[in-house]
Amino acid sequence: MKFLDLAKVYIRSGAGGNGAVSFRREKFIEFGGPDGGNGGRGGDVIAEAVDGLNTLIDFRYQQHFFAENGRGGQGKLKTGADGNDIILRVPVGTEILEEDGETVIADLTELGQRVMLGKGGNGGFGNAHFKTSTNQAPRRANPGQEGVERTIWLRLKLIADAGLLGLPNAGKSTFLAATSNARPKIADYPFTTLHPNLGVVGVDGAEFVVADIPGLIEGASEGRGLGDLFLGHVERCSVLLHLIDGTADDVAEDYRTIIQELEAYGGELAEKPRITVLNKIDSLDDELRDMQREFLEEAVGGPVMLMSGASGEGVTEVLRALRAEISEDRLRQKTTDEEPETWQP
């Protein structure tokens, strides 16, 4: 399944049905009078966050969503049928934006959450509604109310507890593959990761979700490389894990490049709790480890952890540091594969 995190769709709610002009005319029954029914109500357009989706790929093949119109009223005081609603089923974490792409209509962050995007038009009154003591044979009825038509954007921001940041080939995908069942593509060339990946990692009996996004380069905020559009997927994270390639020539400059892109992106992303890790230490001797760590700590202005996603050295300590930054209500208890004991009376 292809990953798609931005889609433009066109919606229209149903129009209300027209009211009817009708008179009761039956043999041997006098004073029939008006009996035109009201029109039915048009269907609504509703967005709902559902389980089992992690991409907006369905909206690439269908962009127009029209709710059903209400039926017109009929004689014998028959009200027209209401139009059926139409539901846009989206992944949890989807933002719904106005056509300008900036104004947020709704943010669906919980399973089952719903929002009405277009209310159906009311049905028109039939002529029976207008009967009065002075106008006992009205010959007019109201038309149904028009539906709402609008263009919206759907933007998916994945729900994750921790997000991975770093330059291309910093070892983010290797770390995710080593700590979870996720199998992101791993290779020795830049931009191996072309779309976000999610993995569930566990440590000390607790589990949390980690998001790996494509690497950033200098000028990503201006569109260089893959740009910074994927940063939206780590906006909801409680903590960011910043990986620095320990074999780089200037680890301090690599660190500053990512921080500058976070600040250029704006919002609160640059202010989120962040853990900085010197990665790929299995390729460094003890002297070079200490020297690279010293350079990086001077740039960070704080402690730096050491890790190797390939060999597993320091991985558990990093996971524990991530867990400490995630609130308990977002953690899940790690499931075990042990078979339950057989019940006996």
Image (cartoon, helix red, strand yellow):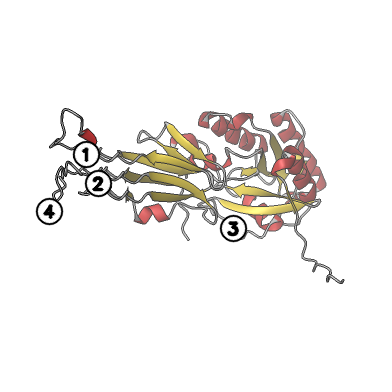
- Amino acid on which disc 1 is placed: Ala
Question: Which one is closest to the eye, mark 3 or mark 2?
Answer: 2
Residue at mark 2 to residue at mark 1: CA–CA distance: 7 Å
> SS class of the residue under badge 4?
loop
Q: Residue at x 50, y 38 (%)?
A: 107
Q: Is residue 122 visible?
A: yes
Q: Quadrant of residue 137?
A: top left
Which is in the foreground here, disc 4 or disc 3?
4
Give the residue at mark 1.
128
Q: Amino acid at mark 4?
A: Lys
Q: Earlier in the sequence, mark 1 or mark 3?
A: 1
Find residue 27 and name its label. Answer: 4
In the rendered image, the vertical position of residue 89 relative to residue 256, given as above or below: below
Residue 326 appears at what percent x and percent y? Answer: 72, 40
Q: Are marks 2 and 1 in contact (CB under 8 Å)?
A: yes
Q: Which residue is mark 3?
A: 184
Distance from disc 1 to disc 3, alpha carbons, whole Å, reads 66 Å
Label 3, residues with CA under 10 Å away: few <14, some 14-19, many ≥20: many
Which residue position holds label 2?
77
